[in-house]
Each structure stands twice: as C-alpha cells, then as structure tokens.
Image: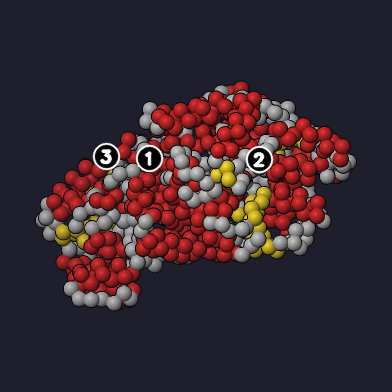
C-alpha cells in the first residue's frame, strides 16, 4: 500500500482546486468538522472553567518546552530504569533505520499499528514494506485510508474526507463480499478481521500522546481499544514519539486528559487511556517482552530558541484547529500537501522542513481569521505564525516578484496622504470605463478572482477626506454640550492610562504579540 | 479631550457614509471628532503578506496622525487590531516602539468607544427591521469586541435581531487571501452569504467594512436584495428616524 501520491503534487492552490470540485469530499468534511466543533464548543462550555484550564495547559507546555532537555533526560533515565530500550533519531531516516533494525532483529513478518501521526511523518509503513514486513493499521480510520492507499487527511479522523458509501465500497473489496453501508456492519467486519491480525503480529507499534518524565511512562489516548491490543498482545513493542511529547508529571496529565478529548471530539474523557511504564514484568499477565521507544527530532529542535515558532512544540495534536478552520472545511486535509494538515499543518510542515521552498506556499492558504487560535487548547497563536512564515519567505528571497512590485506601489501611495488622495481621484475617473449600475462586474486581470464571486462596489462621488471640510463645519454648528458624567469618564480613562493602567479597556482580546 | 477619527482607507475611499454616521452620532454626545489628514492605511495588507518594511512605511502615517490625541476611534475592528500589531512591527526601533505602544493604548473600535469609554448603550435609535449580525473575526476574536455591539443592538427599538448560523465563521475576505486564493475565499463567502439568506433578514449588520464589502459583493453577485450596513450607519439612521 503506497503513500498518498495525491498529496505531493503541485501548489496548494491546485490541490485546493481539486478539493473544491469534489462535492463528496466537501460534504463529508463539512459534516464531520461541524459535528466535532459543535461538540467541542459544548464540552468547553460544560466544563465551566475552560479558559482557565487552557491557560493551565499552555503554562505546562511552555514550562516543559522551555526545559525540554531536563525533562527529556529525566524521562529517558526513568524509562531505561523500567527496562525500556530508548533510541534517539535526529532525522526521519534515522528513525526508520532504527525501526527496521528492530524488525529485522526480531524477524518480524507483521506489525500491527495503532494510530500515530509521527509514523505517518516518517512514512514508516512504506519502509516496513520495503523489507517485506506487513504493516497493518488497526485504528478504523487509518485502516480505511490504508486500504485506499491514501494519507490521513485529518490528525485524529484520518478518513474524514470519505463518506460511508465510499468506505463500504473499500471494505467490501477487502472482505470479498458486499457490505451494507451501515456503520455497525462495517466496523464489525474490521473488528473481526483485525482480531486475527493482533494475534499473529510480531510487533506492536504505537505513537505516544504524552510521555511522563517523572515515571518514564508513555500514555496513549484512544477510543477503539486497538491501541491496548497493540500494546499488550505482540511480544515486541515499538513506540515512536516526537521529542516534544513530554510532560513533567501525572498531575499534569490530568490537565491534558481534560483538554485533549474535549478539544478533539467533545468527549469529556477518552474511552481508553493507557499508561505504559515498561515491558511485561513477571507479575504481569500480558504486555510485550521487549519495549522500544524511539524519540524523534526530525526538525522539532529547530523551533527551540526561535521566539516566533517555539510555541509550535506545545501542540498536543487534538485537531481542534482543523475542525474550527473555515479553509480546512472547504478543501480538506490533502490539499495541504503534508502529513499534518489544517492550520497546525500549514505552520508545522514548513517549520519542520526548515521552511524550504517546496512548502512555502501553504502559509497563504489562510484568511488569518484566528479560529484556530481560539480553538487551540494550549493557545498557540497559529494565525500570527502564518504571518511570520510569509515574512520569512520574503526574507529568504522567495517572494513573488509581481506581488513585491504591488506592495512597493502600495507603500509608495500609502505613505503619503496626498498621493493617496490623488489616486482616489484618478480611480474615480478610471472606473467610469467599468462601472455599471454602481458596481464593477468585469472579470479582467486582477479582478477575475474577486469578481468571479462578487460585484465590486464603485468609488462614491466624494471620499471621506473630500467631504470632511463641509461635514466638519456642519458638525461644529450642531455640536451638543457634553454630559459632565461622560466627560469625567473620559478624563478618568486618560488619567488611568497615564498612570500605567490600561485605561479601563476591556481585556477580552486574544492573540496580541508578546 | 481630543478624539481623532481613524477613518481607515476602505471607509475613506468607498464608504464615507460610515465615517460620517460615526462622527454625526458622536456629535450628539458633544464629542467633537478631529480628522488628521496625514493618515492613510494601517498597513495590514502589507503586514499580513509579509512585507513588513512596506507596512512600517504605511503605519508611520498612522503613528504621526494620532500622536497628540487622547482617543483614536475607527469603524473597523480589523484595522484597530492592526494597531495592536504595531509594537511587534516596530520591535527593533525604540522610538517608534514607544509611539506604537501609546497608540495601541488609546485606540478603540467604534462600539468599544461608545460602550467602554462613553458608557452609552442606548443611542435612542429605532430601526423596525429584521436584522442579522456578522461578528468579524479580528474585532471579536483578536480585539475582544463581543459584547459591545450586542449591548448597543439590544437597545434599538423595533429591531428584530435574528441569530446568524455559524456567525463566528470567517467570511473569507482575508485581505490579499481573497485574490491569491480566490476560489477558497469564494467558497467561504458563498457559505457565509447562504447563512445570511437562511435567516431571511432584511439587513446584515457588522463592524468591519472589508468583511461587509465581501459579503455584500457576493449577495449582489447573486442578486439577493439584502441590505448590508455598518452598525454606525444603522444606529445613525435609527436616531434620525426616531
């Protein structure tokens, strides 16, 4: 089963174009993201102190990442003391190499996998197949897209872009019989089939939601119970984790266990939460005889010490930003072209890849509406990072030449109000050619994209600055006496501001820099 | 008390009636608004596209225009929000940074100014129509203007305010995004306009002219006769008619 070829082609605009013309995809993605984000909003409201807990979650992540070397060492020491083999992989290639070496060493023929985005990032299934080891995804959504030969299009709902009829078709082909497009029948088939695979498998491979430094434990969140099978039945367990998955203690896990499921699916708790602290001991009834944890860098450490991007490492992979994102809703995950999609993917993918050329258009696929930031359980300012990415692209000399000329022109006009006024006057003359009935419908040149969906308003006979002298006269004549109460409010605000307060200004806003 | 109007380039060029409604409404409370002519644009199109040098050049006109006033008011949460980015934009220039911080502290979106500063929620307007409200992303999410417009609208006599489905979703404008990613933006504005039409409201009201221009443009493209207004216009019209 190959990786998703469709994700690696063209520009984000071209890939988005494919998605926008795919009604099945758009309906499926809209349906599920709407359900998830509505559920999330309700779960957050039911919680009662959501914003306070978000801030707690953020502080835990900020603290851990600021001291990542310390907590990572602590985790490694404790995990090793528990009998876990720890490996470090600086690159994707190294992580793959280590995984394959273990598979060869235990003479594995099959690997059962629970859901793991980091193994997707490494294209590990592909690599395992290259040495004739069968890799079987056991999360239902992952199983479906593996059958389809695609990559996940969502961090937690891998097959979000498929409807149940498409899924029934894929699973019927797998079953060799026609399965009705009924969720219970389809899930029942996969469940029976995977049961055998769990029993046969030589290796169980997992990701890691959180690694607890104080005990050396790794924690998995899941809803289907497959990760528990993966981590108890096979004799060898390999866990792949991004180096930033660490949290200090089980106390911190309480906060994460509150934030993650509510943000991801609107669940108060995840169905299964497994804490695994090492291989099977003599007193244990089950569990692997051998346990490996591969700690993957693959571009993560590049964010450390970068004031604009370090917070990216705070991400707990809940997918809430995808569900909230209006762009994601219309174009789905594959249009982003990387393993991680949606707002987090638009920033993380270029960041992990050192912002190299092939990814530099993704940051443009955002209206910067901030829905991602608002949904994020650890308050990562993704909308600001997207702007930083755009700026860095230009700083690296990779800007669009035509746009650069446009922006220079914009600044040349706008840095001088007289020029701006003059341009408005010219515009009023020029628009006579295209204005009909107070609007511009022409689809020529730069107006094509905008006017394919809209009518552009025409410039009125006078701009505000032209109207102002007359208006000002009239207003001075009719000015009312100011209410002394209002006046003293204003004076109090100015005084408070001068004494260092915020001048009575509400503090409901989010996402200001620094 | 010197109150200066930050008209924003869009209102200056395309919607002078909105700026006019603001200043005439405020005159009823004895607020004499000044209009410093050196202002142009907040620089957001350049800033958001990554052209920070150009954004600084443009932003300098705003810093200069409002250096010596006590309050700056504007008909846009997004452009006021851009002023909140100035400290970041000028972080390496101590002189400009200080000006930027001062400007940020005294800048208010129109409804923020009415409610928070003047303490007014009832302007005495009547507007006997069915209205729906789109809260723009930058104003509501990034500047935190959520309650103020609702408090003002609650007091308008005869007005039926109907909830807009998925009101908080972006309309798809996003500045240069609407041009660069025109098909995605088009899908977003079409969905937003669909939601407006579902409400069967006669009037769509909002606080940001860019978003309103976007949605109005789509409604007009589809020949849907929904009237699109800035809240300042609605309130002023309601006061004149009351």
Can you tell which mark lies on residue A168? Answer: none
Residue under numbered circle 3 = A90
Q: Chain of mark 3?
A: A
The structure residue drawn at horizontal position 36% and vertical position 38%, both measured from the top left corner, is: A360
* As drawn, A420 above or below A238: above
- List x then y, in percent, for residue B67: 69, 27
Compute the Cα span from label 3 to label 1. Answer: 26 Å
Alpha carbons under labels 3 and 2: distance apart: 60 Å
Label 2: few (<14), some (14–19) or many (≥20) C-alpha neighbours in 10 Å: some
Mark 3 or 2, closer to the camera: 2
Q: Which mark sits nearer the N-terminus, 3 or 1? A: 3
User: Residue at the location (62% across, 39% down)?
Assistant: A459
What residue is pinned by disc 1? A361
In the image, taking residue A29 as reference, residue B85 lies left or right, namely right
SS of the residue under disc 2: loop
Locate the N terminus of chain B by quadrant. top right
Q: Secondary structure at mark 1?
A: loop
Circle number at residue A460: 2
Q: Can residue A157 be seen at all in this image of the molecule?
A: no
Viewer-nearest of discs 3 and 1 = 1
Of badges 1 and 2, nearer the viewer stands 2
Q: Nearer the viewer, residue B144 or A504?
A: B144
Label 2: chain? Answer: A
Would residue A172 be seen by someone viewing this image from the given angle?
Answer: yes
Q: Position of residue B228 (x, y in %)?
A: 64, 53
């Amino acid at each position: 089963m190959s990786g998703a070829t469709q994700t690696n082609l063209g520009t984000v605009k071209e890939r988005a174009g494919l998605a926008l013309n795919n009604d099945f995809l758009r309906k499926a993605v809209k349906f599920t993201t709407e359900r998830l984000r509505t559920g999330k909003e309700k779960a957050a409201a039911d919680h009662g102190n959501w914003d306070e807990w978000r801030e707690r979650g953020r502080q835990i992540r900020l603290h851990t990442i600021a001291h990542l070397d310390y907590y990572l060492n602590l985790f490694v020491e404790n995990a090793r003391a528990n009998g876990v083999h720890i490996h470090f992989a600086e690159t994707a290639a190294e992580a793959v190499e280590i995984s394959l070496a273990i598979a060869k060493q235990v003479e594995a023929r099959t690997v059962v996998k629970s859901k793991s985005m980091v193994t997707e990032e490494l294209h590990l299934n592909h690599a395992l197949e290259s040495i004739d080891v069968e890799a079987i995804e056991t999360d239902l959504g992952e199983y479906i897209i593996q059958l389809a030969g695609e990559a996940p299009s969502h961090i937690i709902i891998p097959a979000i872009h498929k409807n149940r009829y498409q899924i029934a078709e894929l699973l019927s082909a797998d079953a060799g019989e026609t399965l009705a497009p009924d969720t219970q029948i389809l899930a029942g088939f996969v469940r029976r089939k995977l049961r055998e695979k769990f029993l046969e498998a030589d290796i169980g491979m997992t990701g890691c939601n959180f690694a607890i430094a104080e005990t050396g434990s790794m924690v998995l969140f899941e809803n289907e119970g497959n990760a528990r099978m993966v981590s108890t039945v096979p004799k060898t367990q390999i866990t792949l984790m991004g180096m930033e998955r660490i949290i200090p203690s089980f106390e911190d896990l309480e906060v994460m266990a509150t934030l993650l499921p509510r943000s991801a699916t609107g669940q108060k708790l995840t169905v299964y939460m497994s804490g695994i602290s090492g291989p099977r001991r003599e007193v244990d009834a089950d569990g692997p005889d051998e346990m490996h944890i591969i700690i993957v860098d693959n571009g993560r450490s590049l964010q450390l010490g970068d004031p604009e991007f370090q917070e990216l490492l705070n991400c707990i992979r809940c997918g809430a930003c995808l569900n909230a994102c209006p762009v994601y809703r219309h174009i789905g995950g594959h249009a982003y072209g990387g393993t991680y999609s949606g707002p987090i993917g638009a920033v993380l993918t270029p960041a992990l890849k050192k912002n190299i050329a092939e990814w530099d258009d993704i940051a443009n696929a955002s209206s910067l509406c901030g829905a991602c930031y608002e949904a994020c359980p650890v308050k990562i300012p993704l909308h600001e990072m997207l702007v930083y990415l755009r700026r860095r692209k230009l700083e690296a000399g990779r800007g669009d030449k035509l746009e650069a000329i446009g922006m220079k022109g914009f600044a040349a006009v706008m840095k001088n109000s007289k020029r701006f006024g003059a341009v408005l006057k010219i515009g009023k003359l020029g628009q006579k050619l295209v204005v009909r009935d107070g609007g511009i419908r022409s689809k020529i040149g730069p107006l094509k994209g905008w006017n394919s969906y809209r009518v552009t308003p025409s410039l009125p006979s006078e701009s505000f600055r032209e109207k102002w002298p007359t208006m000002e006269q009239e207003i001075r004549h009719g000015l009312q006496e100011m209410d002394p109460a209002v006046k003293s409010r204003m004076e109090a605000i100015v005084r408070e501001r001068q004494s260092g307060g915020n001048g009575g200004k509400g503090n409901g806003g989010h996402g200001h820099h620094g | 008390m010197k109150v200066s109007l930050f008209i924003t380039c869009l209102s200056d060029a395309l919607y002078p009636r909105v700026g006019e409604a603001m200043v005439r409404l405020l005159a009823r409370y004895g607020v004499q608004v000044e209009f410093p002519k050196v202002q142009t644009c907040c620089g957001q199109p350049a800033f958001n596209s990554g052209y920070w040098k150009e954004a600084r050049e443009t932003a300098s006109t705003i810093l200069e225009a409002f250096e010596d006033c006590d309050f700056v008011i504007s008909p846009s949460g997004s452009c006021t929000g851009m002023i909140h980015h100035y400290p970041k934009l000028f972080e390496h220039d101590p002189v400009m940074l200080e000006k930027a911080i001062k400007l940020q502290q005294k800048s208010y979106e129109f409804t923020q100014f009415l409610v928070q500063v003047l303490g007014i929620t009832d302007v005495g307007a009547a507007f006997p129509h069915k209205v729906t409200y789109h809260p723009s992303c930058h104003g509501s999410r990034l500047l935190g203007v959520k309650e103020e417009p609702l408090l003002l609208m609650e007091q308008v006599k005869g007005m039926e305010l109907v909830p807009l489905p998925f009101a908080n979703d972006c309309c798809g404008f996003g500045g240069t995004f609407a041009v660069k990613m025109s098909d995605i933006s088009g899908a977003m504005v079409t969905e937003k306009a669909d939601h407006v039409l579902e409400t069967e409201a006669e009037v769509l009201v909002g606080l940001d002219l860019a978003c309103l221009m976007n949605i109005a443009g789509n409604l007009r493209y589809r020949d849907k006769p929904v009237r699109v207004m800035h809240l300042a216009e609605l309130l002023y019209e309601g006061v004149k008619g009351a």
